Amino acid sequence: MIDMNGNVVKRWDDYNSSAGGPARVFPGGVVVGAAGANPPRQESLELVQRDFNGNVLWRLDHNQQIETRDGKMVWSLRQHHDWQREDFPAGYYSPGATPGIEGSNTLVLTHTNHVQPKVAANATLEDDRMIELSWEGKIVWEWVASDHIDEFHFDKDARKTIASTPGFNAARGAFDWMHINSATYVGPNHWYDEGDTRFAPNNVVISSREASIIAIVARDASIVWQLGPDYSGSPELREIRQVIGQHHSHVIPKGLPGAGDFMVFDNGGPSGYGSPSPIALNGQGIYARATSRVLEINPVTLKLIWSYTAPTFFATNISGAQRLPNGNTLITEGPGGRLFEVTQDGTIVWEYIFPVFTGPRSSNSVYRAYRLPYA
């Protein structure tokens, strides 16, 4: 945790994960984050909540027993990329969302390995599974991506490419076909208040990097709203232009400028499935762009409300964006550890570069940063 001058005011050293995603600070200095790396899996063993002094208050780890590199069987949450508390829908503070520190359900993005013939007949999938757990750790809701492949609007060329498992990871023994990298509750919003049930607060917004799809999953497990994978089907989509390999798709919370709009960090780079081409010889990564964008989109009209880009703004992976109470946007340009705040006209008014962390893997990458209120 740093102050606005870049000074470290608090550091927790007990969190270590492969792809645990964001850590969040709750009232009273309570922090929740992923812990327990298990390479080569891109996932973490547990979520742990500690007080300001580092004492463990709560943890989630009993989802599945897995085998570690040294042959031991251990309990693992298999959590990756994201998690949310039900009373903290977008994961950041807003006038309408101040979380409690206990009692709330937790939404966790996890992996499950299995064969799903509808996706690929002869390969193990490292499939995305969302689970919602009670405070005591009981699963009260779950959703598995491969069960819904027919709902995602893939054309026949994309389905053929997916079935060929072009991204099979030999080290992990599985194909991470969707690579969902964010999952957030929709949260309270004016669309639902006005009668649009697609935006029910406890529905879930997901983002698939590999497929360039953003969608809302309803509590009955159906897909009730979707953007992508193809953005050429209407004038509104063509104005948005192709979204590629995106992260941190979420609904701007109530009480903030732009509340109810979708915000997404559109990374660029390669993503998407389709016909093989000179830039995608096996049909994976058919879309490509060497710049990033942050987008604000009206989810009902699909009007592009606001965007930020710059000639040298390019984050190939991770990253995110947070709408601030003053109408500015805090952007995490993740791979290079750059955090900056921009106004509506794109003026940079604050900037910080995270220093290189020296260790077994020297890096200054930041998965996702959040601005905290002073009180």
Image (spheres, rainbow, N blue to C red):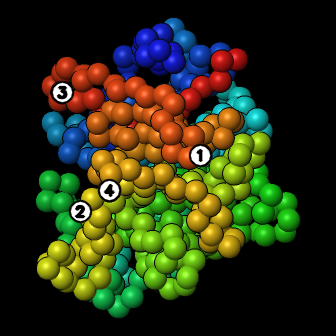
| C-alpha span from label 4 to label 2 | 30 Å
Res 284 → quadrant? bottom left
The answer to which of 353 and 21 lies nearer the viewer is 353
Q: Earlier in the sequence, mark 1 or mark 3?
A: 1
In the picture of the structure, the residue carrying the numbered disc 4 is: 291
Q: Circle 4: is it few (<14), some (14-19), or many (20+) Cα within 10 Å? A: some
Residue 286 visible in this rendered orientation of the protein = yes
Instruction: Give the residue displayed 51% in from the left and 45% down from the top.
Output: 346
Q: Is residue 353 left or right of residue 305?
A: left
Q: Circle 1: is it few (<14), some (14-19), or many (20+) Cα within 10 Å? A: few
In the picture of the structure, the residue carrying the numbered disc 2 is: 174
- Label 2's element? strand
- Label 4's element? loop
In the picture of the structure, the residue carrying the numbered disc 1 is: 344
How many marks the image carries: the answer is 4
Residue type marked 4: Thr
